[in-house]
Amino acid sequence: MTHVTSDRAPSPSTPPSLSLSAERNRRFAALASAFLRGTIAAGLGLGTLAVLVMVVWISSPYPDSGPGGALHVAAGLWLLAHGTELVREQTLNGGSAPVGVVPLLLVALPVWLAYRAARDALSPDEGRPRPSSGGAFGAVVCGYLVVAALVVLYVRGGALTVRPLVAALWLSAVVASAAGAGVWTANGRPAGPLPGWVRAVLPGGAEASEGVRGGLARLRAATALRAGGAAVAVLLGGGALLVGASLVWHAGAAEQSFLRLSGEWSGRFAVLLLCFALVPNAAVWGAAYGLGPGFALGTGATVTPLAVAGSPALPSFPLLAAVPEGRGTWLNWLAALVPVAAGAVIAWFAAREAAPRGGERADVWSVRETALVAGLAAGFCAVAAAGLAAAAGGPLGRGALAEFGPVWWRVGAAALVWTAGVGVPGALGLRAWRVRGRAGAPQWGAAPSGAVPSGVRVPWGGAAPIGGAVPVGGAVPPGGVVPIGGVVSAEGAVPSGGVAPAGDAVSTGGTASPGGAVPLGGAALAGGGGLPEGAASAGDAQEAGGPVLPGAAGAVEERAWWRFWRRPDAEAEAEAEEGAEEGAAVPGGAEEFESYDYMGGDSWGAWDSWHEEGARESRWASLKAASEERE
């Protein structure tokens, strides 16, 4: 008998129990597929290393073990690629010795495979069920760790073994991090809320709404992350350049070391592969050297640009042949240019965002904000440098070889001092240079003395006047824009062409001049806020005592929400050219139109907090205070 399956939805006559059972089966199938992806990812990484090791073993004319020994070595290398420390059970002195230096290039293989498995699990083929994010993450990690547990059991008793508890810790951390990154990517890389301490040190205006303040803090945090990431890239690139230059300088010693390790081409090929896998480690060591702390070559021996202290325990290896010797000279001291370049990159990134070229003077961040962003970028760079230093080193044995590589906390502290010491002053200097010749604007968030100059745009949150407020007597000239949350206080004039956007209020004594538009939701309060001819849009409130100039009454214009910044005459000209009449008289505008409906959350999600009850009450309280001050 042939069974026919269908993907169609169950008919109304299908019993509920069958529908629930089908849904459970679909969820189980999705999780099973994610679990299988995890096992395949682990198997691919293990198989790749096994093939490389077997090729070297087959090509060796004098193998010292059978295929079982080669497979044990491949399994040990796979565990080492996850950060697990290996233990050599058979050494020349008869004891065991740890091997903790992880080739960082080798780490990229399992991390990339676990990342792809989790990401693809949430992007199934058409017609296949999609698991939940948590389910996909758990299934991929579990599938991967099942294979890892079998590998840990396999290597026990071989030449290279591991401690099960340590292996479980490192394998879980690496796989969970990679799978979490894959799930995050599959979900569109959501930003999530900023940590409270980041929002505390990166303010967005004391009087701005919560949503605007959070958006400004997020913009500055993103700038700091980009600057810190670029500084880390410069440190690693500079470190690799130092290692390459030293290898060229010590080319003869490196060649002798390479030839001495093996006399056969298969052995030399294996050494070459190992050197290639250790290139990222060498770049981190070079960066630590340029930062000043240097790196350890055994217990009691440190290599820095000033000198080589102690007696380094140097195994015969081509990369170690490039280590400088003796007291440092001015050529060694030139390594300090690497952290200087990293600090300069932070300064450039921060200043580029703080004072955009070709932008208006009011777009410039304050001195405090610029310094905070540069300092935060230096902190990110220091944390990353410390983490890389911790991953790039480790023991190579016992006794003199128990300590190899940079000391992570020294590298992190040196990176913070260098990048902050160069980046913060450099960012402030570049900011001052880029804003030279522009019209004056307040510093440190202070209100300007007098009028805001012509052509200056007051940004969200008010980097110019405190909270975005145009103070008493402060004029917003033609073309000046008062942003969301900006309050034009008593005698603060919005002249011709000055636009106060939705929800902003022209308070007592504040005059909207001819052509100065107060659009949807803009309120002119009692006793002031004269609305000129044709300036009030649908939904604008004109409370008791507020004068309405000729032409405003009975001719309230309703404009499209996405044209709220345009002047009425410019919009009329555009409508005449298009041959469509988009504006219409709306009698009783404020009674028939809810002034906050035109900026719905679907279209302006980032501005939702502007319409919250607390935000509106805060705006009206500031207007009332301005009116009382006027009286």
Image (cartoon, grey):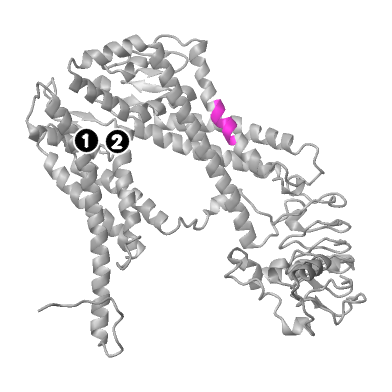
Query: Which label number is shown at residue 77?
Result: 1
| Pointer 1 or 2: first along the chain | 1
Q: Secondary structure at mark 2?
A: helix
Identify which residue is drawn at 58% across, 66% down.
605
Identify which residue is drawn at 58% across, 45% down.
223
Quadrant location of the N terminus in the rendered image: bottom left
Residue projecting furthest to the left = 66
Identify which residue is drawn at 50% across, 12% down.
331
- Amino acid type for the residue under numbered disc 1: Leu
Is residue 345 highlighted in magenta?
Answer: yes
Give the side of residue 585 with respect to residue 22, left or right: right
Is the Cβ of the residue at disc 1 closer than 8 Å to that at disc 2? yes
Give the side of residue 99 with respect to residue 215, left or right: left
Query: Which label number is shown at residue 411?
Result: none
Q: Which residues are magenta?
A: 340-346
Residue 552 image position (x, y, % from top left): 87, 76
Q: Which residue is mark 2?
A: 106
Quadrant location of the C terminus in the rendered image: bottom right
Residue 289 image position (x, y, % from top left): 44, 22
Give the side of residue 549 with respect to residue 305, left or right: right
Q: Secondary structure at mark 1?
A: helix
